[in-house]
Structure formats: structure tokens, C-alpha cells
Image (spheres, grey):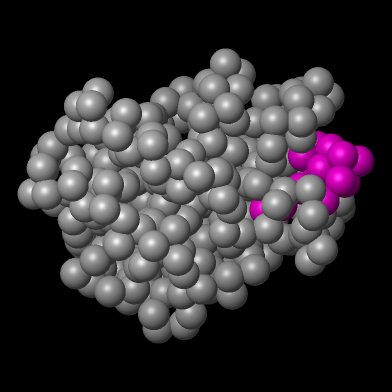
Amino acid sequence: MHSIKLHNNISMPIIGLGTFRSKENDAYNAVKVALEQGYRHIDTAMIYGNEEEVGRAIKDSGIPREDLFITTKLWNTDQGYESTLEAFNKSLDQLGLDYVDLYLIHWFKGYDKALDTYRAFEKLYKEGKIKAIGVSNFNVHHLMYLLEHAEIPPMVNQVETHVGLQNHFLHDYCKKNNIQLEAYAPLMSHRIKELLSNDTMAKVAKKHNKTIPQIAIRWLIERDIVVIPKSITPERIAQNFNVFDFQLDEEDMKTIRSVNDGKKIFTEFDNVDY
């Protein structure tokens, strides 16, 4: 499994299983299958409502805890110093774990609230309950503020990133500041049909005898972006992980860059009303 070293020297597997909208048995079965297929990185969140199922699948897998990388996220209504500490303990209890590998602020909800929340993250990090801390859905101006005021720089920024929204500017900023970019919705989520019907992606897929989703995932890996494709279908879970036996060349990367139209699927970061 190829991993990325975060700025605190923690190793983060470059591909993981996303569990957004995976409920109850679907979440349990997807995590179980993923771990059997070789995944060692699982991404969940308090708001997904599946931390217990994810934790149960982790336990039932029998894989040593130290071999796994588990991410969860703090929901918006729990932001703030004391409420963050309380919510984290609830997530830990639901997952059935002693620590998480990565804890993220799920969405930007204002500068003051982000900083109060992040100070709680720093406390939990110093106590060893979190191996790495970071944010999700933060843009450059949000990160600039956090870097200016935080004691411990964020290690990860998880944002919507795919061939239609390539985030070159944000990615460059994160690289310059040793923040690892992580891509959610790498297969364009509920708009996956747009990805699958893209002629440019189809040509690259044919060249490498791979599927379009495999090309989309490999393209992120080639950019050193961590990727968390979500699926509950065993065949697709396995297929999404089978991306380490080929590489994209410079021509492929340039070709795929032309697919970028800069259109978001999910909420713009400064306009979150939930």
C-alpha cells in the first residue's frame, strides 16, 4: 500500500474507502469487504451516522489496530472548544477505538469558531488521542487564517476534488504549506454518469485497458493526492483499489487536465447553511 508522509511523519495510505451515505449494514459490509481487499484506510464522520458500523467492521476484521488508518470528522453543530471535546469522545466510543488516526473539522463555519474548535483538536492531539489533525472543506483564505493563529499546523485538508474540479491553486497552496490534500467525491459522486460518459476519459481508459473510475483515481494518486472513493458494491470496491499496476504519463495528465471545468457538486465553502 502506497502511503503519504504527513508533516508530523505519520503515514497516511494514499487510498481509502469513503463511507458517505453508507448506512447500517451497507457501511459494515463495505468496510469489511474493503479491508479484505487490502484497504487499510477508512473514512467516516459523525454526521454519516455509521461510526458504530464502521467500528464493528474494523473489530470483526481482526486486523491489528496499528495497521489501520481511521478518519472521522466533527460535525458543524458540535464546533466550539468544549463541545468538540465532548463530540470527539462520542465518536471514539461509537467507533470502539482508543484513538483515531485523523480528525477533521467537517466544514468551515466561521473564523472564530474554527479556531476555538481547532484548539480542542490540538489538545486531543497532544494527549495522543488523535495521530493527525486537519480540516475539510477549507479554502485558501480559511487555511491562511488557521496557519496564522494555530499552534500546530493542520496536516490534511479534505475537499471535493475530481477531474471536473481539479483544484490546482488550492493543491499548490497546500503543498507549499505541507498540508496534504485529500479528495472526496473523486468519481463525481451522484454525477458519476458525467464522468463515465466523458469521451476524453474513455480514450485514456482504453489506452491503459482500465475503467474510467480507475483512471480518475490513478490521476489523483499521480498528483500525490489522497483519494477516498466511496462504494458499497464489492466488485467496485475491489476495482477502485486495483490502480497500482499502471501509471499515467505526462500526455495522459495533460489530456485529463483539459477535462477541468471548475464546477463544484457540493456546497461552496463560504456558503454552508447547515
- Where is residue 248 shown, x and y percent of the image? 21, 32
Which residue is pictured at 30% across the width and 69% down the height? 32
Closer-to-camera residue (52/12): 12
Total count of labels: 0
Quarter-wise, where is residue 128 in the image? top right
Q: Say if the magenta span includes residue 118.
A: yes
The relative height of residue 80 versus residue 173 in the rendered view (above or below) is below
Q: Which residues are magenta?
A: 106-119
Quarter residue 220 falls in: top left
Q: Residue at x 46, y 23 (%)?
A: 9
Q: Is residue 248 above or below residue 250?
A: below
Q: Most prominent secondary structure in the magenta stretch?
A: helix
Q: Is residue 250 left or right of residue 23?
A: left
Q: 108 or 84: nearer the eye?
A: 108
Picture coordinates of residue 141 (x, y %)?
A: 76, 31
Between 132 and 63, which is closer to the camera in this rendering? 132
From the viewer's perspective, tell me whether residue 95 is left or right of residue 257.
right
Taking 78 as reference, is 261 left or right? left
Q: Position of residue 272 (x, y in %)?
A: 78, 58
